[in-house]
Image (tube, rainbow, N blue to C red):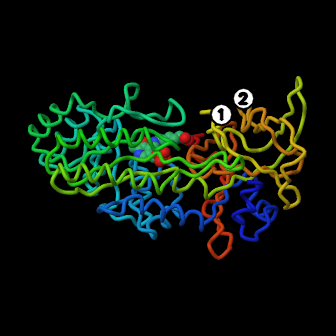
Amino acid sequence: MESFIKAVDFFKGNKPEDIVAKYGTPVYVYNEDILRDRMRKVSKIITKYEFHSNYSIKANTNINILKIALSEGLYADAMSVGEMRILLDAGFPAEKIFFVSNNVSAEEMQFAIDHEIMVSIDSLSQLEQFGEINKGGKCAVRINPGVGAGHHEKVVTAGKKTKFAIAEEDIDRIFDIAAKYDLTIAGINQHVGSLFMDPEPFLAAVKNFLRIAMKFKDLEFIDFGGGYGIPYHKLDDEKDFPMESFKKDFELLIDDFVKEYGYAPLFKTEPGRFVVAESCILLGRVHSTKQNSGVKYVGTDIGMNVLVRPSMYDSWHDIEFIRGNEIVARENMEEQTVTGNICESGDLLARNRMLPVAQKGDLAAVLDAGAYGYAMCSTYNSRPRPAEVLVTSDGELKCIRRAETYEDLMRLFEV
Ligand code: LLP
């Protein structure tokens, strides 16, 4: 694809230079049409059975995006009291929220219990804790299906090398603890990891998970977790996640399970990245170009404080350059290393990448920045976090989070 920005008319007639004149650089820009499209897609991953798609809000917690998710009929999963509170403030009713907890305090569990939010319990000791504070209560347990998947070992959350979930061999202990505190295990959940483009490992985990589910009686729901990938190499024509064929294979596995189990509990999934990643472009300014020991550096204001994924996981994000509101054509390409403005050598957006030759004053447009972009921003090097702007379906620009200021950075100091 020559240009994603042109192919989807991402800015809907708004000029990129006008956007940055108003909101500064860097700035996260979202496209409402793409957001709604992906939200509709995840609502239909399973259609044959009762099914809820829980948007995993850790990927992007902007309250305006949550309101759009609610309007599209999505449910949500939360990882912390903060995420539960944002969801409640966005208007999600408690029954649409699932608290997928990990190593949480009794107080955090109590928050969910007080608000009648279903909690997923991640270890036997946490199940004891839940029983102690909520005798006779109801919860879900997170089970390790024994198979993991993901783009980096840091995001694989099942299999042998992970802190998450309860192992299959401990299931009898779950029943012992449940009996001790008179708990109902209403559901089971898994999450194998983040970003798979090949459905096979996920389907293998689903199969195993459903075999394990047979050990639980009277389940109200089974939650398969998230992890659906998006094409981060779209400029090189990477294909989308094969949702159609995946859906068929997924439903076939569920058919087999339902026959044996005797009825169909509610099925759920927890996509984060798939919902928001492609709806966002991060715009920054090229402030310098230089050559060091034969390497051509393009110096931007998109540091690892703004988008940490490339530095943290060596993640790939496609980059387009914009010069005077025009996309720079993908010709006259040269190997360049695109960096930010943070005081670390690892502050790299793209290493030795073939890109059109960048010039000082260009805008760098980093694609697919909507998931784990702003959500993982920091104020490292005392740089305030950027604004987030939505290009609405009507083509209006709407600020959905203002940029932080120096005063915001100073606010918490006790002096
Ligand atoms: N459910 C659970 C329990 C999770 O832990 C996660 C993500 C999700 C659902 C959503 O996964 P998704 O559909 O977004 O892949 N910061 C990393 C990703 C970490 C994912 C953590 N858990 C990244 O930037 O790639």
Residue 21 picture location, percent across and down = 80, 62
Q: Quick one: SS at disc 1? A: helix
Q: Which residue corresponds to mark 2?
A: 344
Q: Is residue 91 above or below residue 306?
A: below
Q: Which residue corresponds to mark 1?
A: 311
Residue lying at the far bottom of the rendered structure: 394
Q: Is residue 293 above or below residue 309?
A: above
Q: Is residue 307 above or below residue 254?
A: above
Q: Quick one: SS at disc 2? A: loop
Q: Nearer the viewer, residue 384 or 64?
A: 64
Residue 237 picture location, percent across and down = 68, 49
Q: Is residue 254 above or below residue 12?
A: above
Dot 1 alpha-carbon crowd within 10 angstroms: few under 14, some 14 to 19, many 20 or more: some
Dot 2 alpha-carbon crowd within 10 angstroms: few under 14, some 14 to 19, many 20 or more: few
Residue 384 picture location, percent across and down = 67, 47
Say what amino acid the circle numbered 2 marks: Glu
Q: Which mark is residue 139?
A: none
